[in-house]
């Protein structure tokens, strides 16, 4: 297959190929660039979704040079794809578009040098002056890098081409820092050119949430408080802080997962149908539903939220230490590694429906899923004993590790007697003939080059998400979390008791 022509037709449909552009990758010698970004870019190129002129200019402090950068990225691609998965002809063409510059991202003189290099590369590679800046650096440098780009005249779009910037999460550490960062970036990039990345939005099943809701006539009529009892959103992982103790001591699970990943999923589940698939129409509805979320008062936090911290336990049969014993963590740390928030939306669709949102480290399994629990059917046609053995109907949307959709329904068990049992009707993405879904970064990077911002976070959504969690963070800062769940469990017992008070249980099968 010819992989670097401008367009490859798939059946009768032509793939949309972005214009030639140069990606300026800040932090090019870091882990994210090697583990995710360049392998994703090469896969896009190998599949014919990037133009032959596509170019990467990597910048960081390391002294690599063009050939050293190309060798390092080749090794990274082999680790990600397997040595046998690297098409030599495609790599040869792709690697000619990899360039590198060692620079100090705090030095104004180095930005002048970067501008000179970009001029040379753009003329050689014919990228039409289109520039995509990617900040894969510590969040503490986001504002400084943007201001240096602006001062050097590199942030401006011109008649020759466009200029955009991708900013990785975390976007601020609280409401005031997020607003300050937004203000600094908007001095040099208008909102239409700012792409705030949350890689969860690039996951195939997250993208599928809107299709599942709005392309199937069986769901939307039931997607309201008259038919849905409650919703669970779970982001659990068995990993600990994995050497990031110092970072986690400043973050905690609410900042690390709830405020961004979990709220992104939540907004897609709860939002109203957008007027169209236009990026702004979709993002308008996501913000609108978060604006209807009930604020957290101290009373609500104590009654409807749970926090925790993992203690020693076992993961896959092996003993692991507690959070306070992790490297870089204070032995008296009060940082939460588990949080459960009960979200309520004061609107006509969701009146009275609780949304239980939880995330935790050192949990029993790695799972990100949404469970939509419908209300029980009326009547007792099959007898009280059989009814008590049945669950209410559930729609289980598994985002990871194995993307799937399961509808749990009551069915008659085989045999002459009428015995009713819960049965699962499941669809797994792995069964698709098209092969495994693309990595999240592939979709997100391609969209940024095409100028499609649907899967990126707008400023007002960042703002609203921080507004919602700040009362929780402020209340919990008054006294620290204590170890209250064992590593390898499903979290604090208090979270299960909270659901039980409302007649609910977590989906933990």
Image: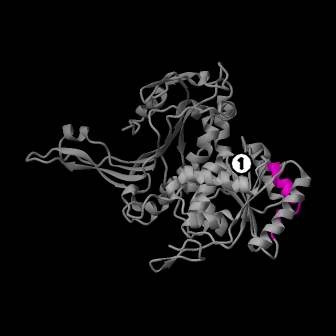
Query: Going by the picture, which residue comes out furthest to the left?
Result: 416
- Crowding at dot 1, Cα within 10 Å, few <14 / some 14-19 / many 20+, comes out as many
Q: Position of residue 483 (x, y in %)?
A: 55, 22
Q: Measuring 56% from the left and 61% from the top, which residue is drawn there?
A: 43
Viewed as shown, does residue 298 lie left or right of 484?
A: right
Residue 22 position, x and y percent, is: 73, 65
Asked which secondary structure carries label 1, the reply is loop
Relative image position of residue 32 (x, y in whole percent): 65, 48
The colour scheme applied to this rendered structure is: one colour
The majority secondary structure of the magenta stretch comes to helix
Nearest the viewer among 296 and 47 is 47
Please say whether residue 364 is one of the residues in the magenta stretch. no
Q: From what the image shows, is residue 394 above or below residue 255?
A: below
Mark 1 lies on residue:
29
Determine if residue 471 is in view. Answer: yes
How many circles with numbers are drawn on the protein? Answer: 1
In this view, the residue in front, 18 or 418, is 18
Q: Does residue 317 sit above or below 374 in this rendering? A: above
Q: Furthest residue to the bottom?
A: 12
The range drawn in magenta is: 143-157
Dividing the picture into quadrants, the one containing residue 466 is top right
Give the residue at x 51% y 52%. Answer: 82
- Asked whether residue 452 is in view, the answer is no
Q: Residue at x 64, y 43 (%)?
A: 468
């Amino acid at each position: 297959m010819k992989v670097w022509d401008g367009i490859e037709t798939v059946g009768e449909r032509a793939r949309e190929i972005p214009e030639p552009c140069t990606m300026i990758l800040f932090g090019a010698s870091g882990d994210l660039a090697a583990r995710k970004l360049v392998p994703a870019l090469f896969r896009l190129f190998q599949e014919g979704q990037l133009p032959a002129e596509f170019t990467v200019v990597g910048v960081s402090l390391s002294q690599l040079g063009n050939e050293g950068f190309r060798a390092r990225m080749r090794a990274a691609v082999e680790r990600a794809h397997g040595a046998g998965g690297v098409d030599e002809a495609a790599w040869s063409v792709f690697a000619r578009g990899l360039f590198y510059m060692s620079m100090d991202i705090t030095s104004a003189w180095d930005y002048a040098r970067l501008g000179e290099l970009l001029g040379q590369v753009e003329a050689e590679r014919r990228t039409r002056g289109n520039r995509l800046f990617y900040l894969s650096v510590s969040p503490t440098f986001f504002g400084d890098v943007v201001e240096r780009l602006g001062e050097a005249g590199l942030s401006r779009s011109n008649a020759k081409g466009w200029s955009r910037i991708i900013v990785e999460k975390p976007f601020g550490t609280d409401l005031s820092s997020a607003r300050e960062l937004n203000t600094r970036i908007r001095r040099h990039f208008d909102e239409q050119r700012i792409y705030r990345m949350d890689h969860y939005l690039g996951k195939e099943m997250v993208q599928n949430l809107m299709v599942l809701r709005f392309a199937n006539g069986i769901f939307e009529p039931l997607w309201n408080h008259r038919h849905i009892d409650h919703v669970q959103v779970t982001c659990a992982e068995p990993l600990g802080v994995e050497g990031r103790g110092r970072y986690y001591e400043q973050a905690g699970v609410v900042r690390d997962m709830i405020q961004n990943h979990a709220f992104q999923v939540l907004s897609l589940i709860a939002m109203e149908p957008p007027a169209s698939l236009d990026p702004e129409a979709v993002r308008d509805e996501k913000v609108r539903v978060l604006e209807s979320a009930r604020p957290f008062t101290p009373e609500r936090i104590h009654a409807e939220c749970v926090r925790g911290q993992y203690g020693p336990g076992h993961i896959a049969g092996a003993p692991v230490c507690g959070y306070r014993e992790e490297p870089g963590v204070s032995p008296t740390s009060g940082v939460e590694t588990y949080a459960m928030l009960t979200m309520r939306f004061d609107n006509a669709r969701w009146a009275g429906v609780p949304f239980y949102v939880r995330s935790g480290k050192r949990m029993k399994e790695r799972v990100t899923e949404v469970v939509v629990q419908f209300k029980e059917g009326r009547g007792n046609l099959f007898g009280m004993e059989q009814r008590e053995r049945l669950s209410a109907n559930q729609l289980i949307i598994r985002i990871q590790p194995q993307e799937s959709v399961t509808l749990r329904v009551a069915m008659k068990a085989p045999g002459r007697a009428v015995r009713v049992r819960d049965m699962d009707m499941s669809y797994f993405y792995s069964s698709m003939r098209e092969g495994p879904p693309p990595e999240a970064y592939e979709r997100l990077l391609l969209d940024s080059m095409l100028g499609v911002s649907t899967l990126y976070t707008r400023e007002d959504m960042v703002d609203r998400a921080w507004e919602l969690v700040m009362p929780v963070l402020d209340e919990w800062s008054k006294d620290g979390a204590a170890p209250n769940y064992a590593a390898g469990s499903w979290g604090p017992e208090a979270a299960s008791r909270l659901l039980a008070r409302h007649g609910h249980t977590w989906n933990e099968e």
